[in-house]
Structure formats: structure tokens, C-alpha cells
Amino acid sequence: MSTNKDWPLWEVFIQKKTGLPHEHCGSVKASDKEIALQNARDVYTRRGEGTSIWVVEADHIFATKEEEKGPFFEPADDKIYRDPNFYKTPKSYTGI
């Protein structure tokens, strides 16, 4: 028999109102995705604040590491074609 200490960690994202983005609000432990949704609902939307809940098993999140901050986010100097100075804007363009 497994205990909740053995259960995976699930990250919880709540959408407060329709049309707004989902925002990370915390984590829950659960044996599967259905239980994770129920736990997230019980913990993070007790007062009806939310229209949608996402749960993602924490092991499935792939993220950058702190030491990659510089090289990963710095602009790519070898892709100068992305610079808007290389494109001609039509005279009729109004910017709208």
C-alpha cells in the first residue's frame, strides 16, 4: 500500500475568469491526475475562485536551469536577418 509520501507532485494552474491566462498557484500530491484535479479544487478554489484548473505532474515539466540564463536568453547574433532593418516597409504602411 502506498502512502501520500510516495505520490507524485502535481503543479496547479488556475484560471480565475474566462479569457484570462492560467496562473500557477501551488502544488498538490496525488496518486493520479483525477485525484490531483480534485485535490487542487479542494485546496485552491474553496471559495469558487476559478473557472478552470490545470494540473501537470512536476516530473513532466522541463525548464531552463539557472546556469543557462545567459546563453539561452541572449539574442542570437548569427541571425541578423531577424533585425527589422533588413526589411523595407511599403510607403503605404501606416503602422496599424
Image (cartoon, grey):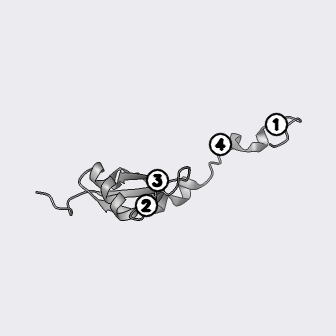
**Label 1 or label 3, whichever comes before in sequence order:** 3
Which amino acid type is marked by label 1?
Lys
Q: Disc 3 marks which residue?
A: 51
Classify mark 4: helix, strand or loop.
loop
- Residue 67 image point, x, y percent: 47, 62
Q: CA distance from mark 2 to mark 3?
A: 8 Å
Tell us which disc is closer to us: 4 or 3: 3
**Label 1 or label 4, whichever comes before in sequence order:** 4
Tell us which disc is closer to us: 2 or 4: 2
Indicate left or right for 79 with 26 as reference.
Answer: right
Q: CA distance from mark 4 to mark 3?
A: 42 Å
Q: Are marks 4 and 3 in contact (CB under 8 Å)?
A: no
Q: Disc 1 marks which residue?
A: 88
Q: Disc 4 marks which residue?
A: 79
The quadrant where residue 96 appears: top right
Classify mark 2: helix, strand or loop.
loop
Q: Are marks 2 and 3 in contact (CB under 8 Å)?
A: no
**Label 1 or label 2, whichever comes before in sequence order:** 2
Classify mark 3: helix, strand or loop.
loop
How many neighbours does mark 4 have within 10 angstroms: few (below 14), some (14-19), or many (20 or more)? few
Which amino acid type is marked by label 3?
Thr
Q: CA distance from mark 1 to mark 3?
A: 45 Å
How many neighbours does mark 2 have within 10 angstroms: few (below 14), some (14-19), or many (20 or more)? few
